[in-house]
Image (cartoon, helix red, strand yellow):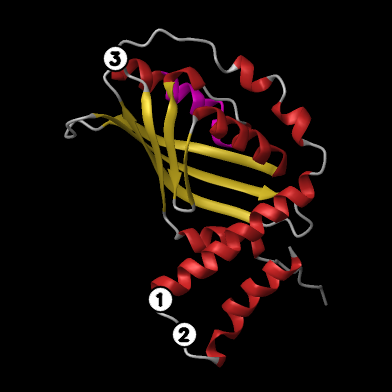
Amino acid sequence: MIKKWYEMAKICCFNRASPAPPPLQFHSQVLKIAVSGVTELLRFFSLSQQTSILSGDIEKQNNEFTVSSVDDVLIIIKSDYDNAYFVTGNFTSSIYAEDCVFQDPTIKFSGRELYARNLKLLVPFFDRASIRLLKIEKDVESDTNFLRASWKLRTNLKLPWRPLIAIDGSTSYELDDDFKIIRHVESWNVSALEAVLQIFTFKFEKSGG
């Protein structure tokens, strides 16, 4: 883990010492190292929390809801935002297809159970977390059933240096003919690299005098 942090710092701070690679290649390299570093960092600090996090809560999210329209799904998603599902892990999993694709600027995977587990593993690291829904609406111009939500996320992380994560973003929800969500795609107002590097931002208190 220390080696990966060193590699990331070296790329970010000392890339002037040698010719810089093409921008896309450079950003991809730094992002890969940063995401790997974050993964190891969270794993290191999670210790034995994982067993208790994964038990119980996922099961109770699987309650079936009768959904017969896009409006029904919109109401349920809005309720999940009221429960701050991004930062609590409490979401209505039954409105998602089992193989739903989840994507944000840093990662892409499929499976609603994996998404639920990922949320539950992250929740213990959030401190004073909030996600505020700005608006949610149907995309009437799309040929497919689409919902789009705009939101503001703010949270500190329970790491020794208490970094602040601040992201304004939107989530697109694509529905199939049975009104199950098959794609959950986030867009952010910052790049993937900028978002990850927020975790490694240290703030120093100014001494009075």
| Magenta stretch, residue numbers | 76-87
Q: Nearer the viewer, residue 151 or 34?
A: 34
Q: Is residue 67 left or right of residue 177?
A: right
Q: How many marks?
A: 3
Closer mark to the observer between disc 3 and disc 1: 1
User: Label 1, on which residue?
Assistant: 23
User: What type is the residue that disc 1 sits on?
Assistant: Pro
Q: Residue 196: within the magenta?
A: no
User: Label 3, on which residue?
Assistant: 69
Q: CA distance from mark 3 to mark 1?
A: 44 Å
**Crowdedness near tag 3: few (<14), some (14–19) or many (≥20) residues, C-alpha within 10 Å:** few
Secondary element at image label 1 = helix
For the question of whether residue 158 can be seen, the reply is: no
Q: Residue 84: within the magenta?
A: yes
Q: Is residue 170 above or below residue 52?
A: below
Q: CA distance from mark 2 to mark 1?
A: 8 Å
Closer mark to the observer between disc 3 and disc 2: 2
The answer to the question of whether label 2 and label 1 lie on touching residues, with beta carbons closer than 8 A, is yes
Q: Is residue 175 left or right of residue 131?
A: left
User: Label 2, on which residue?
Assistant: 20
Q: Is residue 26 above or below residue 183?
A: below
Secondary element at image label 2 = loop
